Amino acid sequence: MTSDTSGTLADALTTGTVVLDGGMSNQLESAGHDLSDELWSARLLAERPEAIVEAHLGYFEAGADVAITSSYQATFEGFAKRGIPRERAAELLVLSVELAREAAHRAHAKGIRRPLWVAASVGPYGAMLADGSEYRGRYGLSVAELERFHRPRLEVLAAAAPDVLALETVPDTDEAQALLRAVRGLGVPAWLSYSVAGDRTRAGQPLEEAFALAADADEVIAVGVNCCAPEDVDGAVETAARVTGKPVVVYPNSGEAWDAQARAWSGRSSFTAEQVTGWETGGARLIGGCCRVGPGAIAGIAESVRG
């Protein structure tokens, strides 16, 4: 499953810290691509797949060990709204993994010798709605309904043989429970990361309770947070490590705030590579960046981790 590597990602987490990539959207936007529609970066799976390969490659060259695929907002329901049939939607989900794998092959061809892995992104239900509700949760759906939404996409992504499934930007415990049920029996490990505000999920549940859901899930190799302010990471790392005993995954935003109505970022970046040392000391073993964190910041993380 790994890209020209000897050993799994789970094995790597027992011996050191692994560097994740940064935001896919900012990489694509900086290359001149318009991501203003509801499919966001997933639109380029069909229209400009080479652009996605280049974005992944840029992060590998910056020092990332893991590429997170462009499937965050790729869902059967979201594609259907654009008139894309289910069979083609499944092909695009598989393609997201293949493009990240292709970037890893190109990185190795360019002389990068360290192991490189592919994480298949599984965004929350709210990402499909494209209305900012992934930052609120509590969609009015039951755990069973959310499981039925996620399972078909997970099955397709798992069949594409990524190294790990990234269950990411999860805003509440209901969706976490659904995702943990949906990954059972797929044969691919997963990490679970919440979107948080302070010491609670975006929906307001205590992180101690949220992380505890994954403590006994054999499929889950890491638990943590993403798409949050860098300042919220330290407490989350301590809680996740203490409650689950698993390696912790962290990849916050730049610190700027997303305005869902204006569909724009505001404020200043507060993300610095120096914060990585504290996260690593607390138990973080997968460290990277999310929205608005680019190759420069990932290079700083890589230098801190490997220095």
Image: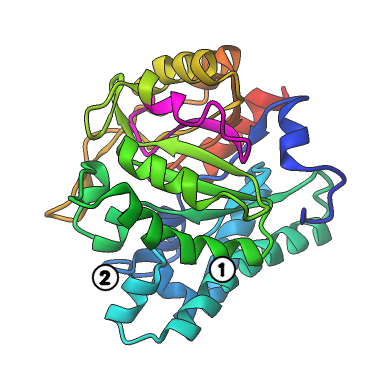
User: Can you identify the residue that label 1 sits on?
Assistant: 156
Q: Is residue 65 left or right of residue 291?
A: right
Q: Is residue 51 left or right of residue 76?
A: right
- Residue 55: where, in percent of width, then height? 55, 60
Q: Residue at x 60, y 24 (%)?
A: 246
State which quarter of the image contains the N terminus.
Answer: bottom right
226 part of magenta stretch: yes
Amino acid type of the residue tagged 1 in the rendering: Val
- Residue 117: where, in percent of width, then height? 70, 50
Q: Is residue 99 left or right of residue 145?
A: right
For the residues bearing labels 2 and 1, Cβ distance under 8 angstroms = no
Q: Residue at x 40, y 15 (%)?
A: 235
Amino acid type of the residue tagged 2 in the rendering: Asp
In-front residue for pair 234/239: 239
In-front residue for pair 149/46: 149
Q: Where, by quadrant of the figure, is residue 269 drawn?
A: top left
Q: Residue at x 28, y 21 (%)?
A: 198
Determine the residue located farthest toward the left in the rendered image: 261
